[in-house]
Amino acid sequence: MAASHAAPWSSSYRLIAAEKWRAKSAVLGSAVTAALVEYALPRPGMQVLDLACGTGEPGISLAQRVGSDGHVTATDLSSDLLDLAGQRAKGKGLANFSTQQADAHKLPFADQSFDLATCRFGVMFFADVERAMMELRRVLQAGARACFAAWGPIEQPYWQTTMEIVHRHAGGTMLEPGGADLFRFSKAGSLAEVLRAARFQEVEESVRKLPWTWPGEAEEVFEYACAVSAPFRPMLERVPADAWPAIRAEAKAAIERYRVGDEVRFGAEVVFASGKA
């Protein structure tokens, strides 16, 4: 993730959560991953850069699409998360996937190195997003696309049944002023505006409603959300210990409203944007 917000996302609790909930979190984000891969239009032989890759997606899916003549370079600030991504790619027998620790604001690649770039739920955390976009444009071939997925508004089921419930009990600010903001591109046109400012061409933006499904219990959803949603950490740490039982009970009841059989089906509003270098 981006420079000024690197520490929380690299912390051990997120790594532990990523391992503990590996299979279920993969299901949770699978529809967004698949939609971004289709949106990116990968072709065999492409050289792809996946920014802020976390534990490996969509880079791993893209590597399966570009074939043995193509290659995916997955970057993140967290070496621990990159290790996980590399292990997952190796487990799938992918020889065309590699990882490199890198800051999006200063990419360690030559000009015009890539035919395609992707970033799933990472662009919101770039400290100087315009600088990162210009750096991305530098390493893309002329006419190559950069494709992004970012969170839409906080007013949607997954966040309303987790972090908004915590906020009602914790009081104060939900997100630290000047800190990482998952929802910074929820305003229509705001991500497209950043792309245009970095001189990307043929910029487009849309909002998609996609499945966001947890294959398990409501208590698990809440635990997972608290563990991996690092920008909310200051708020979570502000909650008095004796308030947690009531918060968990309220969250469980709210989450259960979205249960269908063995799954919790929230749905998600996700911003998709792209531009050509």
Image (spheres, rainbow, N blue to C red):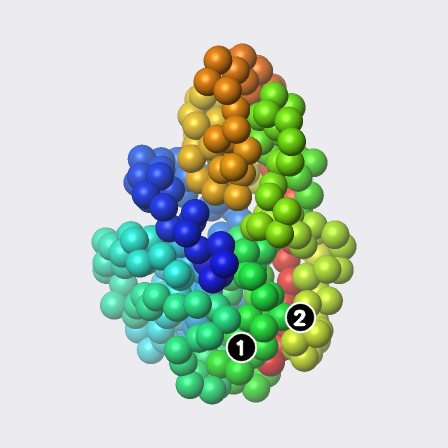
Q: Does any portion of residue 256 appear in the rendered image?
A: no
Which quadrant of the structure image shows residue 195? bottom right
Residue 162 percent across, percent down from the top left: 56, 28
Count neighbours of disc 1 (C-alpha within 10 A) and say few if under 14, some if 14 to 19, many if 20 or more.
some
Decide if residue 261 is on the left or right side of residue 26. Answer: right
Amino acid type of the residue tagged 2 in the rendering: Leu
- Residue sticking out furthest to the right: 188
Using the image, determine if residue 144 lies above or below residue 272.
Answer: below
Q: Mark 1 points at which residue?
A: 135
Residue at 67% in and 79% down: 199
Residue 58 percent across, percent down from the top left: 44, 57
Q: Nearer the viewer, mark 1 or mark 2?
A: 1
Contact between labelled residues 2 and 1, with CB atoms less than 8 Å apart = no
Q: How many marks?
A: 2
Count neighbours of disc 2 (C-alpha within 10 A) and say few if under 14, some if 14 to 19, many if 20 or more.
many
Residue 42 percent across, percent down from the top left: 48, 69
Depth check, front residue: 39 or 235: 235
Depth check, front residue: 4 or 45: 4
Decide if residue 275 is on the left or right side of residue 238. Answer: right
Amino acid type of the residue tagged 1 in the rendering: Glu
Question: The C terminus is located in which quarter?
Answer: bottom right
Q: Which of marks 1 and 2 is nearer the N terminus?
A: 1
Residue at 43% in and 28% down: 223
Depth check, front residue: 201 or 186: 186
Residue at 62% in and 70% down: 130
Q: Name the residue under label 2.
A: 195
